[in-house]
Amino acid sequence: MLLLFWGGIVQSQTDIPTDYFSNPLDIDLVLAGNFGEMRANHFHSGLDLKTQQKEGLPVYAPADGYVSRIQVQHYGYGKALYILHPNGYTTVYGHLRSYAGEIEKYVKDTQYKKETFELELFPDKTLLPVKKGDIIAYSGNTGGSGGPHLHFEIRDSSQRPMNPLLFGLEIPDTKTPIISALFAYPISEDAQINQSQNRTKLRLTKQKDGSYKSESLTAFGKIGFGITTYDQQNGASNKNGSYKIKTTYNGTEKFEVLFNKFSFSETRYLNRYTDYNYYETNKSMVQKLFREKNNPLSIITKEDENGFVTVADSLNSIYTIEVDDFKGNSILVSIPIDGKNLEILDPKKEEKTDDYIYADHATSITKGKFSIYISANSLYEDTYLNIEAKGDTLKFHEDVIPIHTNISITADISAYNEADKDKLYIGRLNYRGVPYYNSTTRNGDKLTGKTRTFGDYTVAADTTPPKIKSVNFSEGKWISNQNFLEVKITDDLSGISSYRATINGKFILMEYDYKKNVLTYNFNDNVNLESENNLKLIVIDNVGNSATFETKFFRKQP
Ligand SMILES: [Zn+2]
């Protein structure tokens, strides 16, 4: 039975078709980001394909199939398209400027019918079939995209994102992965590294053969290692992720991480796998080459003692780390370890407080007007939290510990004027003390916000409605030659929640670009206009303050 099981796995790996999907762009593939690379709170689930710093490149169906899903969002993937192929794989395209042909028409028609910009559709297989090479969309920069590119994914039949390079897409890469830092972590109570019980950075020296050697260290007890590493491909300077990391201890394999596929339900465990504290303080991701409890990540493909090593007194040993990219370019680090149980000079840093949280218990805490509810397994490990309430502000530890599932913070607002209560929200104070809106609900005199970030929270009031300003037209003017209407919308505190625009009382589709704070109407949408047109736009913020903008413009009739 065991043999059959392993046979099955090998079989499914070799079943990945390597000549089925073609390049979805008609330019050479250059990566701005690769599969599995580490981003805030998630592993990147596809390839970010460069589009020559511009938008509007045609995107081609890489194989036959049909449009199985369309999603338009202000944030996230922006305008996204999903194609299901007859072999069971789905390809995904994100941050599109627009869809093409019949797909665009179908989306627009539905947006007008439902009177909404954001939507999610699941067309059946007869509605929008595509043939390999059809233009399906145009690349863009919509949603949470930091510059024009195409986000491209391949998902298996269980909607798990897979490394698209496994499918034979060609990305030239002759560059060796870079290792930028190496750390050792004491794990057991009696463990130490260079007489310290804390994370210890180790110096690396490049050897003649190109490999790295760390300074030799003294250690004792159960310890683990972590690295910061990145890889680059030819033709771009972007720092992308590596493909495989393998470690050994005295020649025995210890641990392997492989970026072939994962599932979306596990992606947030990135915060468990990486050193969250180090990332929040240094903005650099350390991959911990061991599995701690509450880490179910499937990218860990081999492990002995969860990747930890136990160093005995008076014994010399050697630990190695090998980092590979997809093309097999490889770099090796060797770390000589001198087993010594020495006097501790740098004891474990841990601030003890009144609030010790057991990760596997649900916990309720009350401080001043605030009550906090932490569900079981919201945190990965037991910890002391530093929590203090001062009037309307709650100091809720610091953003150096990861939170896996939402923690709720409830504030008692009975002391506020009845009229003001509707304008309150729970805000998270940024470094300048501005209360950023945190999704908030009100139930009588209780205001509840949910969060996955430690930090300072406050009960904030937003009494100012959004601001609305025309960008490319002005009141009472003829604008017959313009293709677009652009309006700027902003809100100073709680942020934009919704908007609705009409011309002469009829709904018009305005697309919202939150990065530019701009709403755009496209005259090609062919809403029937008159010579004299009245535009009305209502914008509502997250606590319900509403602003109405009305103006008139003229357009020559055809
Ligand atoms: Zn992407």
Image: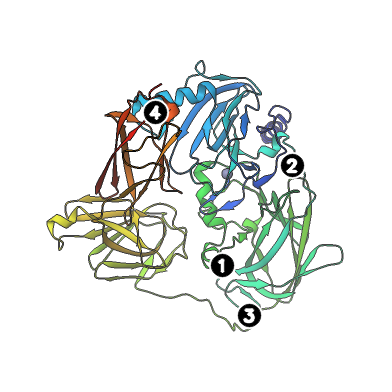
- Position in image of residue 133 (x %, y %): 66, 24
> What kind of residue is marked 1?
Asn
Circle 1 — which element?
A: helix
Lower sequence index among marks 1 and 3: 3
Q: Secondary structure at mark 4?
A: helix
- Residue underneath mark 1: 282
Rendering coords of residue 286 (x, y %) = 61, 61
The residue under label 3 is 195
Residue 63 is left or right of residue 403, and the answer is right
Q: How is the image coloured?
A: rainbow
Cα distance, mark 1 to mark 2?
Answer: 31 Å
The residue nearer to you, when weighing 121 against 296, is: 121
Work out whether mark 3 precedes mark 2 in sequence or the reverse, and give the earlier one. Answer: 2
The residue wearing badge 2 is: 171
Numbered badge on residue 111:
4
Residue type indicated by callout 3: Gln
Give the left or right position of residue 415, taking residue 263 as reference: left
Q: Nearer the viewer, mark 3 or mark 2?
A: 2
Spatial CA span between label 3 and label 4:
64 Å
Q: Quadrant of residue 480?
A: top left
Q: Along the line of sight, which residue is nearer the eye, 195 or 87?
A: 87
Q: Residues within 10 Å of mark 2 (few under 14, many from 20)?
A: some
Callout in the foreground (1, 3): 1
The part of the image, by quadrant, that contains residue 427 is bottom left
- Residue 26: where, in percent of width, then height? 69, 32
Q: Are marks 2 and 4 in contact (CB under 8 Å)?
A: no
Mark 1 is surrounded, within 10 Å at the Cα level, by few (under 14), some (14 to 19) or many (20 or more) other residues, namely few
